[in-house]
């Protein structure tokens, strides 16, 4: 595992931690490549049911690394395009993970860091979290992260914050829907764990299909083709093995098999010695 990332797997959850605290977890080309590889590996890992993205040190992610930016200043168009495509691929890989994802935002998230948060399904932030879309201050554009940030906050608000680069505190980020919820620093892990408790007992195949459903429905009009597509989706999942097991367990007043599987691998806390 690369030093700039930590991956801890426990109880069917993978905790991916950006581990460059000395530069506030800023991106460079190496970190972007490693994140892409880790997300691709987690997609294939059947022991992982959910993914938490976190940051070491005081910040979640401060955007682009200064030394990386210095190198980019000497790049031509083709090199810049390759760099941008690598970042775009990483964000798309995170966004398209079939497993539920949670951003644990304990501190500042700037520029590309905002993109990371927006590409996750759920984002829980502490009161110390703050967001800045700083690209405009550098004469740049938040182009690569824009599909995810605009999806989160909407076009009207994106126009404002993309153009001004204002600081967005945790309360405002919650209002803008960048954050799903806000908790105190002491309660942040508890809030994340409470969500994970729900996520890991959902149907694995159902969650993957739901994520694809949300992307598809959000992107198109509620026309005849969309209605027909949603009918097809529910019919397919009802006759799937997981769908049949879920319905049977409900009717038989028992837990579905995938919940039993989770309970079998869950690590129980040690008993206190008397």
Image: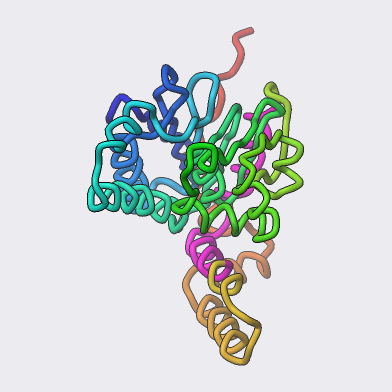
Q: Main secondary structure of the magenta part?
A: helix
Q: Nearer the viewer, residue 91 or 54?
A: 91
Above or below 198: residue 124: above
Left or right of 81 on screen, residue 100: right
Give how far across and how far down residue 190 sits, in percent. Answer: 66, 30
Q: Nearer the viewer, residue 148 or 124?
A: 148
Give how far across and how far down residue 181 sits, in percent. Answer: 71, 41
Whether residue 190 is in magenta: the answer is yes
Name the residue at 55% across, 71% down. Answer: 213
- From where the camera sits, is residue 152 visible? yes
Above or below 255: residue 225: below
Q: Nearer the viewer, residue 76 or 38?
A: 76
Quarter of the image containing the N terminus? top left
- From where the camera sits, is residue 45 visible? no
Give how far across and how far down residue 98 sits, in percent. Answer: 45, 58
View extreme (front): residue: 139
Give how far across and how far down residue 242 sits, in percent. Answer: 50, 68
Name the residue at 40% across, 23% down. Answer: 20
Q: Quadrant of residue 254?
A: bottom right
Left or right of 214 on screen, residue 89: left
Quarter of the image containing the C terminus? top right
Magenta span: 187-214
Name the residue at 62% across, 86% down. Answer: 227
């Amino acid at each position: 595992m690369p030093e700039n990332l930590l991956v801890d797997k426990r109880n069917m959850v993978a905790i991916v931690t950006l581990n460059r605290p000395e530069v506030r977890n800023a991106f460079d080309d190496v970190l972007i490549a490693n994140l892409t590889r880790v997300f691709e590996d987690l997609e294939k890992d059947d022991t992982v049911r959910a993914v938490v993205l976190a940051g070491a040190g005081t910040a979640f992610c401060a955007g682009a690394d200064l030394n990386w930016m210095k190198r980019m200043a000497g790049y031509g168009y083709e090199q810049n395009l390759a760099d941008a495509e690598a970042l775009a691929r990483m964000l798309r890989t995170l966004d398209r993970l079939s497993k539920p994802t949670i951003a644990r935002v304990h501190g500042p998230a700037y520029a590309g860091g905002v993109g990371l948060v927006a590409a996750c399904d759920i984002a829980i932030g502490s009161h110390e979290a703050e967001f800045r879309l700083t690209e405009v201050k550098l004469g740049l554009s938040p182009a690569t992260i824009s599909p995810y940030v605009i999806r989160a906050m909407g076009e009207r608000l994106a126009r404002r914050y993309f153009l001004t680069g204002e600081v967005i505190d945790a309360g405002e980020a919650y209002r803008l829907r960048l954050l799903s919820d806000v908790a105190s620093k002491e309660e942040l892990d508890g809030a994340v764990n409470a969500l994970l408790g729900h996520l890991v007992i959902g149907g694995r195949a159902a969650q993957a299909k739901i994520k694809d459903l949300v992307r598809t429905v959000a992107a198109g009009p509620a026309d005849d083709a969309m209605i027909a597509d949603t009918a097809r989706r529910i019919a397919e999942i009802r006759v799937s093995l997981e769908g049949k097991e879920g319905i049977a367990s409900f009717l038989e007043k028992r837990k579905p098999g995938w919940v039993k599987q989770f309970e079998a691998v869950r690590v129980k806390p040690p008993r206190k010695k008397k």
